[in-house]
Image (tube, helix red, strand yellow):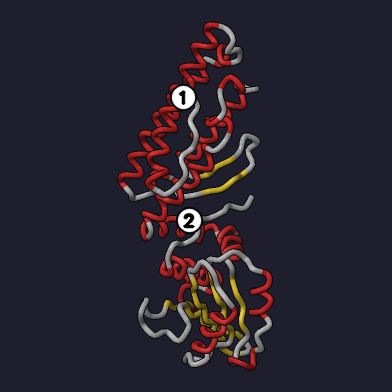
Amino acid sequence: MQLDFPRPAEWTGLENLTAMLVENEYGSLNVQRLGRQGQRQDGVDVLASTWGPHGDLQFGYQCKAVQSLTLTQVEAECALAKNFKPTIDRYIIVTTIPRDAKLQSSVRGIDSKTYGFPVDIWFWDDLNEKINRAAEVAQAYFSKITLEAQPAAASAHAGSLHRALDRAAFLDSIHYERSVKELLVALVRTRAFMRTGYLHDNLKNFVESTVPPHKIGDKRYTTFCSTFINKLDQLYYFVQANMDELKDTGTNSGAAAAAKFTNLRAELLVLANKEFVRHQLDELPIQV
């Protein structure tokens, strides 16, 4: 199973992640983080030095936390790295954009004679795969993003919660529910997501992951999550205790249970929608 990790929101987060992955491969003593934002770095953010029977090698990494990236921008960074001392033996562009086959091919097609080194590119898909193969990096990365980008962590969690609630269990009328047992499973999966950050569907298939609420330092958001979890638990325990009634909403007891369920779920969604609006997400429809 491969986890889908949240992307760093800023350049510093991407540099930290890159350094962790490179340190995992070459050892921390072989890796240097160079300068800081605003300082001249000659196109290199992270430098890895390796020693072997054929001599020392220097690998330079340039981190680009951007929404888009062009070959021209890559070549501009290569031109800067050409002047880096010590001389780079291999140059890797690290970016948060999704894998782009055309750009990937163009970058790898850069003639090594042009800048004095071959050029490669790591897209976010590549980074995500590398994190999944490095358990210690995965754990450390989650810790770092919660400390360095709390607003981004809260927004990422809100987005995942929005997707978790955007399904029949929370949006469709209880009168149309075909399986109360499946409804209960959906609530169980959502409760687990709120406690762990891992979201699965009713068949236990992994959907996505994000920072769990207890690791987010945004006090307002964690207060929301605490209240949300309490209301979600209340809804879950009500369904669990009234499964027989909810199976037939045509009876008097079933209709009463359906009305109570609808009210409890509406309270949950009203609370969630207020937080979604704060994070510039669409409100979810509410059945009344």
- Checking the image for residue 137, the label placed there is none
Q: Nearer the viewer, residue 133 or 231?
A: 231
What residue lies at 55% left-to-right and 11% top-to-bottom? 254
Helix, strand or loop at label 2? It is helix
Which disc number belongs to residue 139? 2
| Vertical relation: 153 (above or below) 39 | above
Say left or right for 168 vs 33.
right
Number of labelled discs? 2
Residue found 42% across the figure and 43% down from its top: 276
The answer to the question of whether label 1 and label 2 lie on touching residues, with beta carbons closer than 8 A, is no
For the residue labelled by badge 1, is the local secondary structure a helix, a strand or a loop?
helix
In this rendering, which labeled residue sits more in front, label 1 or label 2? 1
CA separation, marks 1 and 2? 32 Å
Where residue 93 sits: x, y (%)?
A: 55, 76
Q: Nearer the viewer, residue 219 or 34?
A: 219
Viewer-side residue, 69 vs 64:
69
Q: Amino acid at mark 2?
A: Gln
- Res 235 label: 1
Query: Are there few (<14), some (14-19), or many (20+) residues within 10 Å of tag 1?
Result: many
Q: Earlier in the sequence, mark 1 or mark 2?
A: 2
Q: Amino acid at mark 1?
A: Leu
Q: Position of residue 162 (x, y in %)?
A: 49, 42
Residue 25 lies in quadrant: bottom right
Q: Quadrant of residue 134?
A: bottom right
Residue 179 versus residue 127 in the image, above or below: above
Q: Position of residue 176 (x, y in %)?
A: 61, 22
The structure residue drawn at horizontal position 51% and vertical position 66%, both measured from the top left corner, is 67
Measured as percent of width and height from the top left, residue 57 is found at: 56, 86
Classify 192 as above or below 62: above
